[in-house]
Image: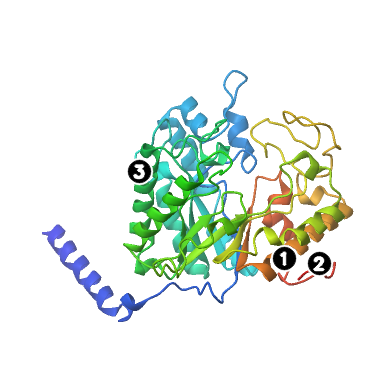
Amino acid sequence: MRTQLFITTLLAAVTSLVASAPSNLHDRSVAFDWSTDKVRGVNIGGWLVLEPFITPSIFEHHSSADWPVHDEWTLCEKLGQSECFNVLKSHWKNFVSWNDFRKIKDAGFNVVRIPVGYWSYVEPWGPYTTGAAPYLDVAIDWARQTGLKIIIDLHGAPKSQNGFDHSGHTASWPAWGDSDSLSHTHAALKQIEQKYATLEMQDVVVAIQFLNEPFLLKLDQKMVKQFYHDAYYSLRGISDTPAMLHDGFENPSWLNGFLTTQDNDVRNVVVDHHEYQIFDSGLNAMSIDQHVALTCNSVSNYDSSDKWTIVGEWSGAFTDCALHLNGFNYGSRMEGSFPGSYWIDSCAGKFGFVSSWSQDWKDSVRRYIEVQLDAYEAKTRGWIFWNFKTEGSAGEWDLFQLLDNGVFPQPLWDRRFGKACENF
């Protein structure tokens, strides 16, 4: 009898909530106008997909000389799915909080990009554990409460789309792209989109990114293009939520004429471009003046697209000194400890906690951040900094540390170093 009374009361409450819902619920559109609104965002990286340089403690604690942990795959392979779940559950619960979202909003940001792995949405291949998906729901609630928008980014695909540790599985060559991995990727996207690309979610979710950083130097471009085509039309079977395509580390113009309004009246497509000046020994050897000049001169890398374009990842780093940045215990190009590199300079004083940096180094990093902000504001629909925080050893990638130490501009348009570029 109590059960029947409870159900009756619950149904009455739900009916009341439905009756009081806005009458225009199904007339909603995405609560972000990509043609006029500027993205000023930050990535919530290292949370639902692990990265060694963001949370080194997880990797250091569980690695051994005979079995190092490089990524989420090897963590779960070593621990087993059950224990891996316990380790990751603690991380998922504690690494990100409502206060983090509040701090992001209070600092003038309007968007967070949240990387997820395919293994959280469909049966994974290999040792991965599931369980991260409910935490994205929590993040959406936090975003709604704090007034932030969310881009959901499929960061890890079956067999790895780039071979990088942040795809979930480090590999010398990405094996993603065969029929099995493509169908499994589409299945994961379908699960994500059926839940988060609905009209009811469009007040918060302003784009679905089909895949992060497919490495076109090692993948077939036609295959990637067909994947994007199929993913776009699958999404359109649900709603008009914007679709985001990564340019694969190529000039975004390679996608010109594809999925445009002239192409079967396609709409709401965004191109994501990533700008880093560190993953090459020659770049690490450059002076701060040279990095600033390169930023000015690199706008042609991303301003020739016929679609809305954002710089969806960038940082304050102009060295690769951050611990585990190139992979767990892979060393750095700066000090010549990365395979195939040579000594350039010491990393001392160039990474770690921002509070430990010299004022000169803080000024150099701020100068580099300022010129990037100016370039991306002038030449794109916006930008998303990588990352919101780390455990501390990668200060140039850690927005919260940079904010707390006056290295990231506050307000966002504040400038200490004036205009650096003459071409915009």
Q: Amino acid under label 1?
A: Ala
Q: Is residue 233 left or right of residue 163?
A: left
Label 2 with label 3: CB-CB less than 8 Å: no
Crowding around mark 1 (Cα neighbors within 10 Å: few <14, some 14 to 19, many 20+) is: many
Q: CA distance from mark 2 to mark 3?
A: 45 Å
Q: Is residue 181 left or right of residue 246?
A: left
Residue 240: image location, x then y, percent: 39, 68
Q: CA distance from mark 2 to mark 1?
A: 8 Å
Q: CA distance from mark 3 to mark 1?
A: 38 Å
Residue 263: image location, x then y, percent: 43, 66
Of the pair 24 and 262, the residue shown nearer to us: 262
Labelled disc at residue 421: 2
Label 2 with label 1: CB-CB less than 8 Å: yes
Residue at the image point whose x is 51% and y is 38% from the top = 168
* Quarter holding residue 336: top right
Q: Amino acid under label 3?
A: Ser
**Direction bottom: furthest residue:** 23
Residue behind mark 3: 183
> Do we see residue 131 in this rendering?
no
Residue 375: image location, x then y, percent: 72, 65
Q: Earlier in the sequence, mark 2 or mark 3?
A: 3
Please identify the quadrant where the N terminus is shown: bottom left
Labelled disc at residue 375: 1
